[in-house]
Amino acid sequence: MSNVEDHLAIRELAARYNRAFDYGDPEGWVECFTEDGTFNIGSKELAAGSEALLAFAKKSIPGMNVKHCTTDAIVEIDGDTGTHDAYLILMDCGDKISASNCGRYLDNVVKQNGKWKFQKRVVEIDGK
């Protein structure tokens, strides 16, 4: 896989993550992470490892009617590891569609068996 293909695959990983969450697929959301992957909001770790990630997703996903929009990604790759830094705009899709939050994702990614996955995903929400 060329460097360009890796960049595109990492951006697609973020898109798969967004769609899995937004369309109610907890298992698909967890598939975006390594088995020992972690999910944080700021410095607070919300889940670590596949079991905890799945429990978090099954609890969080059903109660949210949102769309995650990521943009302006910066991807840096060094062999089979890399980083992904992207802006996040979280849209509330309830009665009146509106932006409900914004921030950025700061991700560590790794390539395992030819597929890129999040090893550590940190969400930094603006204004918090």
Image (tube, grey):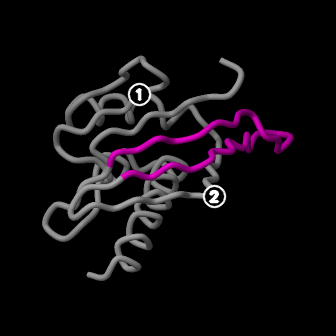
Name the kind of residue labelled 1 in the image. Answer: Asn
Give the residue displayed 37% in from the left and 32% down from the top.
Answer: 39
Q: Is residue 47 magenta?
A: no
Task: Name the residue carrying label 2.
Answer: 72
> What residue sits 40% from the left and 63% below the top?
10
Number of numbered discs visible in the structure rendering:
2
Q: Which residue is mark 1?
A: 40
| Nearer-the-camera pick, 46 or 56 | 46
Q: Is residue 56 above or below residue 106?
A: above
Range of residues picked out in magenta: 83-108
Q: Is residue 81 left or right of residue 74?
A: left
- Kindly identify which numbered label has been placed on residue 79: none
Q: Position of residue 51 (x, y in %)?
A: 20, 33
Res 27 seen here: no
Magenta portion: prevailing SS class: strand
Q: Secondary structure at mark 2?
A: strand
Residue at image point 21% right, 62% down = 80
Q: Cβ–Cβ below 8 Å for labels 1 and 2?
A: no
Distance between mark 1 and mark 2 Cα atoms:
21 Å
Give the quarter of the figure containing the N terminus: bottom left
List x then y, in percent, for residue 109.
31, 51
Single out the mark in the foreground, 1 or 2: 2
Magenta highlight on residue 87: yes
**Left or right, residue 68 beside residue 20:** right
- Label 1 crowd (10 A; few <14 / some 14-19 / many >=20): some
On the image, which quarter does residue 49 sit in? top left
Of residue 17 and residue 27, the one placed in the foreground of this image is 17
Residue displayed at 56% across by 58% down: 73
Residue 46, position in %: x, y?
37, 22
* Residue 57 position (above or below residue 19): above
Name the quarter where the C terminus is drawn.
top right
